[in-house]
Image (cartoon, grey):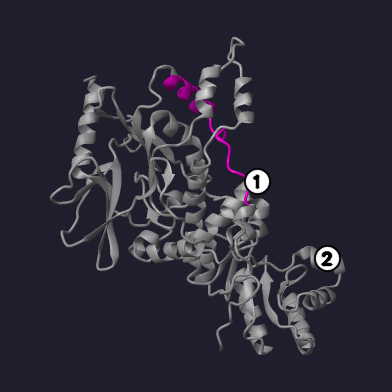
Amino acid sequence: MKKPSSQSPESPREARSAAPRRAEAAEALSPLLTDLYQLTMACGYWKHGMDRREAVFDLFFRANPFQGGFAVACGLEEAVRFVEGFRFRRSELDWLADLRAADGAPLFEEAFLKRLSRLRFTGDIDAIPEGSPVFPHEPLLRVEGPLMECQLLETALLNLIGFPTLVATKAARVCLAAEGDPVLEFGLRRAQGPNGGLTASRAAYVGGCAGVSNVLAGMRYGIPVRGTHAHSWVLAFGDERQAFEAFARAMPHNCTLLVDTFDSIAGVRRAIQTAKRLRSEGVRLLGVRLDSGDLAWLSRQARRMLDEAGLQEAVIVASNDLDERAIAELKRQGAAINVWGVGTRLVTAYDQPALGCVYKLARIREPDGAWRECMKLSDETAKTSVPGRRQVRRFSLEGRYIADAIFDLSRPPPPRWRIVDPADPIRRKDIPPEAEGEDLLQPIFRRGERVWAAPPLDETRARTGRELQRLDPGILRFVNPNRYPAGLEESLFERRQRLIDCLRGGG
């Protein structure tokens, strides 16, 4: 039997229908996209003469999402755009001037607001590229510069990196489950608001989805858009045969028919009849879509019926609350599905609504010019932060990634590399001397100037697939995945332990 083509209006094609229209993107995000305490701390730094002291912050997460073995970095391009446009406008400063403290006095004095009016980011940012597999405790971003500037970026950066990374990871898992079949993101109507829908569509494409239903995301980011008709089309005609023929004539080159409005098998039969009747009019049935019922059984029946009718090229699209586990199970059952439409459970990261990214001060320069290492303590080992100016070195052997070492750039590299799991010090790994290393965090800003050019989104999406294939397959499993060795370089771990002892002992 000839393998069905995946070239349907609900599956990817090589050609783009339109280029991204970045000029029509939304205005730059306001610096007021922050928590109030960021501004009250900034005011405090300013009043105490600390606002220009040099500082280093790291943005990272503490546990892999979805009980999985990896995450996929995402959101950098939007974060860069935010930092580039970071400035307080007159209307925003006027609004801040009207805020009142508990006693009715102005919360912020005029001189501080004047300081904000001149504020721009003047520091350095390094980041791991979008589409890279990342792991707990690794800094996705390192932000260095004047303390007040770095502090005021915190909330927005967490927002702009955390959610996209979560959705890109979910999309990558769904695409792994689909085993090379096209996956389409269909979730805009269930997304967390319009901005959440746009962010999710872009992140889903980075994670590996072949297209989206979100037309605005298609225009803004140059993502392929896909879709045909809904149940309302059939109900508007009342008669399924008439509805199918009308749609086929209206969209002769985009004819995938939704067959489960009344009865799926009967709907497939009518779709086949429509294809045969209208073939002479230039209509080609690209496929049928199943949106309910026993998808494994229905898809096998639909495949048999289509093949017997000589429609071997027609694809079967499936939707209906799918995620990676549902797709993997349908694959196990032998479902004859060619294209997967995944909506709610993808764009909302349904089974884990937040990644839990954090942004921690790692070191600060004292008035005498010396650097002081900073660390948050916790009774939970995993929540104790890591001091220093950190970088991540990824080691590979024979084309496979074998370990990541989180190390301090301000110290000389070790003669031999050994890593320690920060959450479980018993877990240690020696890196073979023949392994090749690559530092992951790349320069993005230097002295406030952008030095990084964002790659085309297609390249970022390709990077995700390519990089995941370099991980051990056990790390990609959905159930009880292997733990990728990502840990602190041994001397950094030991220095962290000494600092913990010092802080707890009051030394």
Q: Is residue 41 magenta?
A: yes
Which one is in front in this view, the residue at disc 2 or the one at disc 1? 1
The C terminus - image quarter: top left
Q: On screen, 301 above or below 157?
A: below
The N terminus - image quarter: bottom right
Q: Which residue is label 1 attached to?
A: 193
Q: Position of residue 324 (x, y in %)?
A: 51, 61
Local crowd size for mark 2, using a 10 Å CA cut-off: few (<14), some (14–19), many (≥20): few
Local crowd size for mark 1, using a 10 Å CA cut-off: few (<14), some (14–19), many (≥20): few
Highlighted magenta segment, given as a residue range: 25-46
Q: Residue at x 23, y 29 (%)?
A: 499
Report the number of discs. Answer: 2
Q: On screen, 437 above or below 107?
A: below
Instruction: Determine which quarter of the picture holds residue 365.
Output: top left
Q: Residue at x 85, y 72 (%)?
A: 239
Q: Is residue 376 left or right of residue 335?
A: left
Q: Which residue is label 2 attached to?
A: 235
Query: What type is the residue that disc 2 sits on?
Result: Leu
Q: Is residue 501 left or right of residue 37?
A: left
Please tell me which residue lies in front, 121 or 250: 121
Task: Label 2: state its secondary structure.
Answer: helix
Q: Position of residue 278 (x, y in %)?
A: 79, 85
Query: What type is the residue that disc 1 sits on?
Result: Gly
